[in-house]
């Protein structure tokens, strides 16, 4: 049994990490740190509760720490864990700069410790469907890929993600998902052009982005808006043999917030009304969405720690994501196209 501690008790911990950990027979939730200490002691009487991350790291005998604190706290907490010899999972984005990400990657490698990033949307059912279509070469040679994460949130809310600060705003919050998905499919682009904007009244962080990733024979569009009240495009995949179009978001987050557990047979299954469609010049085909499985991330974490299997999201990949996030912000400010350095080799999973 792998003993796990969770640092932070906000939306991410409550919605994703703790339910996924508790659904697995491989993990024991042993400790949590949060300022809500009294509440946690009532909800988790069998779990050690600490009011600071520092106290947990110093006192809890665990095999793995999962960091779900605000983005700007990821780096110091992860560094402290690694320097104390503790394996780490970090909520995305890994940290707020690629330099910090590279430093943590180096520390983990030098100390032979496990470091992974929770890029859960690699296990969205619609993204797994995209991967299956590509594996089966259904659309032929891919020439265009569009990925959206649109919502209707026209008013600013009092959440740390919407307050000024390093790593806040939708580009780091949602863009980290879309960038990770894109480069896991196609590798690093040759160049990029970005618009990362603040459009809502009273907003002090990025709440809109439209980012183009330029490849030699492929164009990728990553887009998020806070003003999308209409049915939302999720993916558009175009190739020499046809096109696939998918609307609507993966249901797992909504299921978890409503109390559906990852062990429920219906978990991750999408309603047929939201299936995507594959179009050719002469036909249209409904494509059943693959069943989503965020629990697979923790299954692979268990296999990595217990059996030495591969890391589901290694830190080198997180460095790539952060470099794209940083370059896009520069591109947006300067209004220019920027080349993407090939300091890290391309990967296509």
Image (cartoon, helix red, strand yellow):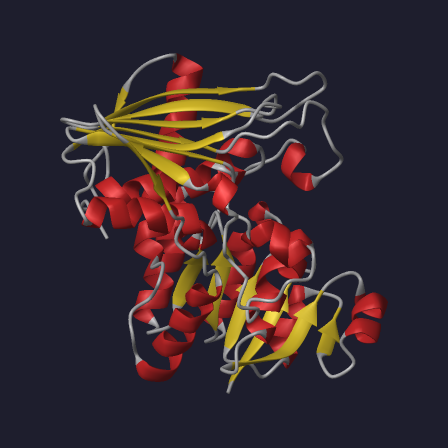
- What is the residue that sits farthest to the bottom in this orientation? 1
Point out residue 202 in the picture as x, y percentages from the top left corner: 72, 19
Q: Is residue 82 visible?
A: no
**Residue name at image x 22 percent, y 44 percent:** 134
Does residue 315 appear to the left or right of 195 in the view shown?
left
Point out residue 120 in the picture as x, y percentages from the top left corner: 46, 54
Q: Is residue 157 visible?
A: yes
Point out residue 112 in the picture as x, y percentages from the top left corner: 33, 74
**Residue name at image x 61 percent, y 21 percent:** 227
**Residue name at image x 58 percent, y 25 percent:** 207
**Residue name at image x 42 percent, y 76 percent:** 302
Which of the 4 quarters of the picture holds residue 47?
bottom right
Number of on-image labels: 0
Which of the 4 quarters of the picture holds residue 246?
top left
Does residue 192 lie above or below 176 as drawn?
above
| Depth check, front residue: 108 or 119 | 119
Does residue 275 appear to the left or right of 35 in the view shown?
left
| Depth check, front residue: 323 or 39 | 39
Does residue 277 lie above or below 74 as drawn?
above
- What is the residue that sits farthest to the front in this orientation? 282
Does residue 241 appear to the left or right of 256 in the view shown?
left
Point out residue 183 in the picture as x, y percentages from the top left corner: 29, 42
Does residue 24 lie above or below 327 as drawn?
below
């Amino acid at each position: 049994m792998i003993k796990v501690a969770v640092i932070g008790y906000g939306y991410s911990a409550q919605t994703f990490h703790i339910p996924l950990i508790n659904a697995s027979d491989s993990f024991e939730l042993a400790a949590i740190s949060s300022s809500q200490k009294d509440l946690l002691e009532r909800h988790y009487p069998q779990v050690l509760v600490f009011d600071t991350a520092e106290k947990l790291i110093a006192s809890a005998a665990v095999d793995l720490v999962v960091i779900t604190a605000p983005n700007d706290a990821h780096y110091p907490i992860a560094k402290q864990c690694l320097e104390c010899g503790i394996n780490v999972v970090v909520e995305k984005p890994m940290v707020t700069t690629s330099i910090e990400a590279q430093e943590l990657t180096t520390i983990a490698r030098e100390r032979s410790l496990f470091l992974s990033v929770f890029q859960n949307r690699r296990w969205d059912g619609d993204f797994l469907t995209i991967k299956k279509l590509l594996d089966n070469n259904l659309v032929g040679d891919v020439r265009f890929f569009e990925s959206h994460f649109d919502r209707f949130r026209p008013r600013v809310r009092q959440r740390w993600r919407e307050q000024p600060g390093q790593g806040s705003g939708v580009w780091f919050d949602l863009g980290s998902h879309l960038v990770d998905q894109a480069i896991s499919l196609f590798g690093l682009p040759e160049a990029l052009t970005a618009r990362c904007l603040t459009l809502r009244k009273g907003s002090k962080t990025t709440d809109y982005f439209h980012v183009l990733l330029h490849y030699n024979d492929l164009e990728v569009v990553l887009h998020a808006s806070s003003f999308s009240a209409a049915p939302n495009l999720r993916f558009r995949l175009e190739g020499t043999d046809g096109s696939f179009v998918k609307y609507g978001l993966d249901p797992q987050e909504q299921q978890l917030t409503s109390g559906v557990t990852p062990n429920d047979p219906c978990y991750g299954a999408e309603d047929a009304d939201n299936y995507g469609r594959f179009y050719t010049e002469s036909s249209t085909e409904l494509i059943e969405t693959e069943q989503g499985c965020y629990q697979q991330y923790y299954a692979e974490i268990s296999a990595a720690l217990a059996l030495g299997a591969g890391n589901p999201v290694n830190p080198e990949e997180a460095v790539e994501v952060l470099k794209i996030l940083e370059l896009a912000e520069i591109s947006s400010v300067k209004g220019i196209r920027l080349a993407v350095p090939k300091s890290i080799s391309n990967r296509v999973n």
